[in-house]
Image (cartoon, rainbow, N blue to C red):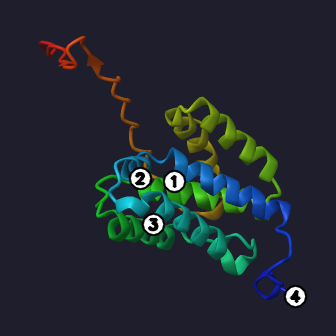
Amino acid sequence: MSSADAPADEAPTPEQLQFARTVYILLEMWPALRQAVNEGWGGPESEEKKSFLLSHLCDEYGDGGARTKPDVDDLTELIESYVMEEYACELEDDSAHWVAMHICLAHTSIFEQGKGDEILTEYEASYARTGSHKLVAQMREDIRHLSDDEGEPAPAPAPAVPKEKPAPEIDEDGFETVAPRRRR
């Protein structure tokens, strides 16, 4: 009996849980989606829309069989389309491709190579540090190895992660202090 035919009350496998947690972390760390949700570009349901995307990706690719193995180009298109439709956001960088590559890497590592604990530990450590730029450097090499093994070209470098803006300073009169511009 395949996972698709399994009863709905059957507990998920450890691999399915690892995959779901990894996809969750990737979506949380994705700056474009994080900004769209934080700024409410999807309306009052912005957070629910992100949760729906997570559920859809796990339902679609989380069974682990060869027939559910994600294709990076199809997955990139799915993610870009979803973000454009639900958040009215057109991505002008390769960040959706970057997310898709990591989902494909996670799928291969968890379901084919049995390295779910290892890859999940790496993603959780990067997420805990909240330094997604470190994740980019750490995972590029893994993606190159994955691409080399499959005979595909290595992916383009991940986009730079924007710096967080400091919180505004409010003076005693309630006005925001504006910092002077730096001269070049």
- What is the CA distance from the residue labelled 3 to the residue labelled 1? 20 Å
Query: Residue at (26%, 17%) from the top-left corner?
Result: 170
Q: CA distance from mark 2 to mark 1?
A: 30 Å
Q: Which residue is mark 3?
A: 79
Q: Earlier in the sequence, mark 2 or mark 1?
A: 2
Vertical position of residue 60 compared to residue 47: above or below: below
Q: What amino acid type should be assigned to the residue bearing mark 2?
A: Val
> Whole-percent x and y of residue 83?
38, 64
Left or right: where 106 falls relative to 3: left
Of 129 and 36, nearer the camera is 36
Q: Residues within 10 Å of mark 2 (few under 14, many from 20)?
A: many
Amino acid type at image mark 4: Met
Percent from the top left, x then y, of residue 157? 44, 45
* SS for dot 2: helix
**Can I make out residue 133 in this image?**
yes
Mark 1, other Cα within 10 Å: few <14 / some 14–19 / many ≥20? some
Tag 1: amino acid: Ala
* Residue receiving disc 2: 37
Residue for badge 4: 1
Kind of residue sitting beneath label 3: Ile
Of the pair 12 and 76, the residue shown nearer to us: 12
Circle 1 is placed at which residue position? 154
CB within 8 Å, label 4 to label 1: no
Q: Residues within 10 Å of mark 3 (few under 14, many from 20)?
A: some
**Looking at the image, is mark 3 or mark 1 earlier in the sequence?**
3
Q: Secondary structure at mark 4?
A: loop
Q: Position of residue 162 (x, y in %)?
A: 36, 35
Is label 4 or label 1 in front?
4
Among the two numbered marks 3 and 4 on one chain, the one whose residue lies closer to the N terminus: 4
Closer to viewer: mark 3 or mark 2: 2
Q: Secondary structure at mark 3?
A: helix
Distance from the alpha carbon under mark 4 to that under mark 1: 36 Å
